[in-house]
Image (cartoon, helix red, strand yellow):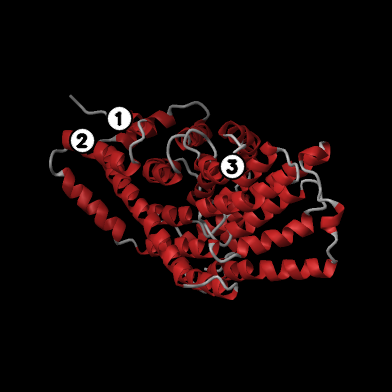
Amino acid sequence: MELNPLWMFVPLILLVFLGHPLGFILGGVATFFGLLGWGPQVFHVFANMFFAMQANYLLVALPLFIFMGNMLGRSGVAEKLYGALHVLMGPTRGGLALATVAICTVFAAATGIIGASVTAMGLLALPEMLKRKYEIHLAAGTVMAASTLGILIPPSIMLVIYGAMAQLSVGKLFMACVFPGLLLSGLYSAYILIRCWINPELGPPLAEEERRVPLKQKMVMLATSIAPPIFLILAVLGTIFFGIATPTEASGLGALGSIFIAAANGKFNWKVLKDAVFSTATTIGMIAVIAAGASCFTAVFLGLGGGDEVADLLMSLPGGRWGALIMIMIILLVLGTLLDWFGILLLCLPIFGPIVTTLGFDPIWFAAVVAVNLQMSFLTPPYGIALFYLKAVSPPEVTMAQLIRSIIPFLILIIIGLAATMAFPQVALWLPRVMIK
């Protein structure tokens, strides 16, 4: 009896719903089906997969970018920048929400750590907006949606892993996601402005006494607070764009730059360094376990012919190659409600990557489209991790039901951004084509 590899997803989904760790689920299911299909030699395949993953030079950038994000989150940059934007944009309707989007966009371009961004903005921005009578759904939705931009706007650890897996230039992937990320940031800002213009009670401006800060002082506050993250962005993305450094080399610059920024803000000490290193090691350990399990799972799935099964299924859909692409996007969206982005990427990229290339789509553009799609995985329950991060730091009166309702408009905005990136490929492809090799 021939073993159909599609059956591998049945125990996978069941065990995910039961709450078991994803890395062990993937490895366990792979071992069971691998033994059924190949016998004990499956362990030789697993050993080769582990070695290939550990020998990938591009992955050296991963701990350095994670360390950079952890150190920057402890440097006090977010607090200073939010304080400046609070004063500068507060007089505008919805100004604090707009300031939240702005700081998250800048912060995203300096670090790709989602947990740090959601937690920091949940502690900084949400209480300030609620204290000034902002509507809870607008305030919470803004914090969660804007804080997850770090996984899209480079330097993103997701793009490092994507490039390593797909054998694509990480530098080009970084550049490809700059404008899609700014597009989402712009959509969030436009939504806030329009809603607060129609109904000012959703995001009232600051009181008159809070606005009485001289313009010169406002400009000094903004310049001094935005200079450190801009320095870091130029050190990382600027050196990659102009061909001065590879992404791996740039990650080292970014890690060193984050230490300088923390020191300049008087936040650098042994405890901060130790916490950043330990947090980085914990994250890398989690990633390594999931990566090992996912590598085994995809090796068995593809080895048993699962890739051909999926390709035949997608090719038979109406709508030609665009019908197949839309179905891939729907599958990624559904998986985002069950798994984190890392597991989705490791599971789906080896399966969908060759199919997309066969369909004639640009792999760099497809990577940007996937990155935009996976923004929703942070916001969609039951797995949406941003919901849990924000609930952990929110005031007690903020309920999970309110948080879930608050993300609905922003999910629609992400779908609009996804459709725009798909309909107009130059949104993602223009910058990589002009970057210096």
Amino acid type at mark 3: Met
Find the distance from the CA under tag 3 to the CA under tag 1: 33 Å
Instruction: Tell me which numbered mark, 2 or 3, is placed earlier along the sequence.
Output: 2
Q: Residue 126's mark?
A: none
Task: Find out whether the residues at labels 3 and 1 contact each other: C-beta distance under 8 Å.
Answer: no
- The part of the image, by quadrant, that contains residue 82 is bottom right
Q: Residue at x 50, y 39 (%)?
A: 384
* Nearer the observer, 80 or 193: 80
- Residue at disc 3, secondary structure: helix
Find the distance from the CA under tag 2 to the CA under tag 3: 38 Å
The residue carrying mark 1 is 11
- Residue at disc 2, secondary structure: helix
Tell me residue 94's x, y (percent): 77, 46
Neighbours of disc 3 within 10 Å: few (<14), some (14-19), many (20+): some
- Residue at the top extreme, as displayed: 1
Q: Is residue 101 above or below residue 319?
A: below
Neighbours of disc 1 within 10 Å: few (<14), some (14-19), many (20+): some
Tell me residue 119's x, y (percent): 55, 51
Amino acid type at mark 2: Phe
Task: Find out whether the residues at labels 2 and 1 contact each other: C-beta distance under 8 Å.
Answer: yes
- The part of the image, by quadrant, that contains residue 28 is top left
Lateral position of residue 288 relative to residue 359, left or right: left
Tell me residue 270's x, y (percent): 45, 72
Q: Residue 422's mark?
A: 3
Instruction: Tell me which numbered mark, 3 or 1, is placed earlier along the sequence.
Output: 1
- Residue at disc 1, secondary structure: helix
Q: Is residue 327 above or below residue 253?
A: above
Find the distance from the CA under tag 2 to the CA under tag 1: 10 Å
Q: Residue 32's mark?
A: 2
Q: Which of pointers 3 and 1 indicates the residue nearer the eye?
A: 1
Q: Is residue 124 above or below residue 84?
A: above
